[in-house]
Image (cartoon, coloured by chain):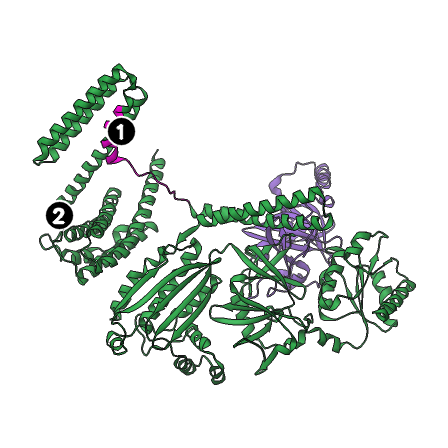
Amino acid sequence: MAAENMEEMEEIIQDFLVEAEELLEELDEDLVKLESESEDSDLLNKIFRAFHTIKGSSSFLGFEKLTHLTHRLEDVLNKLRKFEIKLNSEMMDAILSSVDTAKSIIDIIKEGGDPESVDVEGNIAALSKFLEEKPEISDEELIEAQKEEIEEEEELEQQQEEQQDEKKEKKSDEEIEAEIERLLKQRMEEDRKKREAKKKQQEEQQKKQQEAEREQQQQEEEKKEKEEGAPKQQETKKPVAKKSKPIIEQTIRVDVNRLDDLMNLVGELVLGKNRLVSVAQKAEEKFEGDDVVEELSGVASQITLVTTDLQMGVMKTRMVQVGKVFNKFPRVVRDISKELNKNVELIIEGAETELDKSVVEEINDPLVHIIRNAIDHGIEPSEERIKAGKPEKGKIVLSAYHEGNYIIIETTDDGKGMDPEFLKKKALEKGLITETEARQMSKEEAFGLIFKPGFSTAQKVSNISGRGVGMDVVKTNIEKLNGIIEIKSELGKGSKFILKIPLTLAIIQALLVKVTKDYFAIPLVSVVETVRISKEDINKVENKDVLRLRDSIIPLVYLGDALGIGNNKKTINSKEIYVVVVAVAEKKIGLIVDRLIGREEVVIKSLGNYLTNIKSISGATIMGDGSVTLILDVASVVNEASNITTNIEDHMIDHAISEKKRPACLIISTQDSVKQSIREYAKEAGFDVYVAYNDKEALDIASEHIVDIVFVDLNIPINGGYVLAKLIRDFPAYKNVYIVSVSTDGTYDKEKLHESKINDIIFAPVTLEDVEKVLKKLSNEIKVA
Amino acid sequence: MVAKDVDLFDKSLSIAAEQEEEIARQQKKTDAIILKDEYEQVVGFMLKDELFGIDILNVEEIIKPVDYTHVPNTKEFVLGVINLRGKIIPIVDLRVKFGFGKKPIGSESRMIVISMNDFNVGFMVDKIEKVYYIEKKSIEPTPSNIPQTIEKYVKGVGKLQNKIMTLLNMKELLEEGGGLN
């Protein structure tokens, strides 16, 4: 039993913590609002009630310090709402600081610490100043206050009991005894009420109550006679019900972990759906027009629809309004502007815009830093503003809206704006950039300098800024969310910070690309655009490849090089070069890939504990065919890319062709006898010979050299010769290569041979004649071509 | 991009019958009942020409090699990652890890999927032998002639009737991780 009680108590405390936190959060916002609208009695009452509620629960749970503090706050608010005292800035400071203390007590309770260890005397003394008559509450008063509450609660309980009784009565009308008991109880309670209300209305009330009683008695008598009395009786119940009827809750609290689990399951479902769709497509290709296949396609598209809806639904349950974060900012702006002695007004727009809970948690810190920065560096002191012909009060607009699968959060100030030249000068002074870099820098790039760690334009270090860490935090946090930062600024008019963040982190849209033999998924949020260029479009600036795209110059890096898998790989077709322009935070770069595959919805999975913090890779996903595709961490790829110098020409097929002096052949087999015999003859015929044991090796060789003929053992690990032949054919340089399959066990699948576009087949043991025949055929084919 | 379905019921690995035989044989010989806590059950496998053993409690399953995806910026011995029923599992080539030199995947190669303390890793090995019962008494500390490259991954050496098995220290193997630091 004791354990059960403990559990119950825990639950009550948990509920209290959640409620108190919510109330305190709202209080911050309301209090700041109160400062400008100190006469608003609705608002005053709301604040008063909040303090009252916290006080009540905390005294019930025995948190003395918190009770004491909130009681004093309640007193101050009581005087305020009765307009006995007037709100001033000093009083507001005292109230806000007390609220902060209350928050810290809640935090301590949450962490299982001792809530009585917090010192509230300072706050209480500060608040007491505004309550002239009573410097300190006596214990008696406290007890009295508690008594009052207990009585109030008892009343409520009794009313509820009554209700319950009445309900019972409805079910079993014959229980007259219970009826009488109920009436007695009611009368007793009414008597007590009378005693409490020592006012003139007493008599009137009495009359009314007596009347009511009489009425009820009459009805009960009626009811005894007829059972149909019930509806009428309900009428009399109404007034009571109105008083204590709880508002029906339309929301429930759900543990976030459960939602996470649900989201994971939906993720699995999305993978399953992708797989189903790909199977259906394959079936359609193979058996076009078949009834069953058509039905399968129908089912697949229906499942796709339902899955999408389900995914949206689960995502929506995880959505919270961005206002949860925004509402903290009136207080933040108030505190900072006060400290810096600036006059700033904050306007919030789109607070109802929703986004995933996990994202909301991450955007708070960046926004605090951006707003701090805006007040400190953006908004000018009042005198300066007046001189510049601007309104005395500075304005910061914090707004949010949806754009596709992203949320855009903008912070706009009407301050002095940023001077790119000044930023460059400062960065040069601090040694963060070189002279040449400064010269080449565009306006946007110069704005981006503020995100460099250690960068600061502040003349002196203040409590708020000047240490050059704040904006760095913004960048890292936004990068973590796969977000983009854009800065617009006009000197003398103000600046605008635009954050573009994906709505959710678990399932994302991604662009699939191929680099050498591997596939990667680039989160679509980071992709600005994709362009197809040819070799001639690539320019060199200071020995680095760049692309002139409209009016901007974009550095180009081969993705393979950025990932460290590009060594010696020559797979780019110089006439068709694909560039994926990605943006991370404030940086833009063009990643060259071998091919663009398409866009896909991917579920992010972790690589597990064994592979943590892998550079450039943020996770993996499972594709429709069951294979694993890695998801790029674009921020780290871009970082890496800007640190390396590469030559894109090295990766072009032309380069490989110009290097090639003799015809070449590639042999893939696990059987030494096969390799041996083919190699011998090919060498004799003047071929360069490359040998591979499995498909992975073969693809690596195929992306490093260009061969004229491929001998592939149909039984090679891991996926067999048919699949490998298809993959080799997939390389741009191998579209027309002559592929000869080698069957070591005498069997082969004609259909698969055709499907994989295998040109010829020979059987083991391979004889010199076999190879000779093939090579002859090949030379004939080349002649024909 | 095509991955074969993982073969979950690899018949070549059904060694239960053999095991029982061995136990029975030993019982006859020693004329004593085998007590569980006196023996350690280990999965024996070959790397190059040496016999290694992993505690069976750490082994989740043994699968035939499936297609893996190479992960850039990892240590050389990390082959890549595979999809095992929706879970991403990194694959470590133990030959490379122990400095035995790379050997292409052959028909006898297997992946031993380990699950231990939140770690899920697959070890690529040359060949699975069978499950051995090793008497705990017979396990000896690492001898000094073990190459330094693998010394820290060795828990001890188990003596079998006519061979010696190197028992691996899973904790050390797993916690090292496969990322470049």
Circle 1 crowding by C-alpha within 10 Å: few under 14, some 14–19, many from 20: some
Nearer-the-camera pick, A348 or A63 = A348
Residue type at mark 1: give it.
Answer: Gln
**Magenta region includes residue A251:** yes
State the purple chain: B
The answer to which of marks 1 and 2 sits earlier in the sequence is 2
Q: State which chain disc 1 sits on.
A: A
Tell me if residue A12 comes above or below residue B113 in the rendering. Answer: above
Q: Is residue B34 left or right of residue A45?
A: right
Mark 2: few, some, or many residues within 10 Å (few <14, many ≥20)?
few
Q: Which residue is mark 2?
A: A138
Image location (x, y in percent) of residue B141: 62, 55
Indicate yes or no whether the magenta region holds residue B9. Answer: no
- State which chain disc 2 sits on: A
Residue closest to the eye, A140 or A184 = A184
Residue B30, image x, y percentages = 70, 39
Foreground of the two, A194 or A137 = A194
Q: Which mark is residue A616?
A: none
Image point (19%, 37%), residue name: A152
Q: Give the magenta part as a residue range.
A: A232-254
Answer with the quarter of the image where residue A168 lies. top left
- Image location (x, y in percent) of residue A380: 29, 74
Query: Furthest-left residue in view?
Result: A200
Q: Which residue is tagged 1?
A: A163
Q: CA distance from mark 1 to mark 2?
A: 38 Å
Q: Which chain is green?
A: A
Q: Is residue A574 left or right of residue A523?
A: right
